[in-house]
Amino acid sequence: MQQFKFIGGIILTAVVLFLVIRYGRPPQMEQPVPLSPVPQESRELCYIWNTEAGDHATLRMTFTGTGGSVVAGSFDFNPAEKDRKRGPFEGTAGPVDPKAMARTAHLWWHASAEGMTNTEELSVIFGDGTAGVGFGEMKDRGDGTYVYASPDKLSYEPTLQQTDCGDPAVK
């Protein structure tokens, strides 16, 4: 009987030792596989406005980043009775406003007109096939950058209509 207890103890110890060795160690960590850069998805929207009087505007916006929050593009505004302003911009776009079913882009426009280039604040509300660019009184914030004097009093007219970005009228 004593002999069975001794052999049973050895077997039990061997089983416990095997289990501790087999399952008691932390698992070996594999070397991480280097991640290849995730390609940035982008989406492009284009808008156009023309009148019989000869007014013309084009807006091209490319969205990247999480939820399309990073915006870059160009705006060309050519009213028939005033000087043309055009140039690239960059900034951010907010989420969809559920009430208006539109998004607002807050941009910095590098607008060229009459041989000079200035950086100007630019607000664009877009959605449901249209876009409106905020126009209003501007003021120099002290460093040569122009910002809206009264952001709550902007006019978002005229309304630009969405068009295919391959349209030759959208430069």
Image (tube, rainbow, N blue to C red):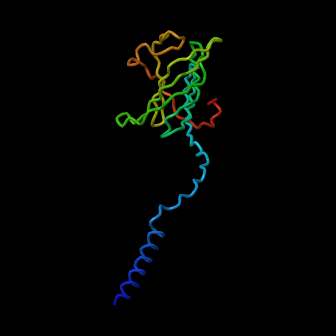
Q: Provide residue 76's location: percent of width, then percent of height.
A: 59, 23
Q: Quadrant of residue 81?
A: top right
Q: Position of residue 122 (x, y in %)?
A: 50, 22
At horizontal 43% and vertical 13% (from top left) the residue drawn is 149
Q: Position of residue 154 (x, y in %)?
A: 42, 19
* Residue shown at 65% from the left, 12% from the top: 115
In the rendered image, the quadrant that contains the C terminus is top right
Give the answer, above or below, for where 86 lies relative to 114. Answer: below
Residue at image point 58% right, 42% down: 40
Q: Furthest-bottom residue in view?
A: 1
* Depth order, front residue of 100/94: 94
Give the vertical position of 139 relative to 155 (above or below).
Answer: above
Is residue 54 or residue 136 the one in the foreground?
Answer: 136
Nearest the eye: 91 or 57: 91
Q: Position of residue 108 (x, y in %)?
A: 53, 22
Residue 168, by quadrant, is top right
Q: Assign the N terminus to one quadrant of the image.
A: bottom left
Seen at 61% across and 50% down, the residue is: 34
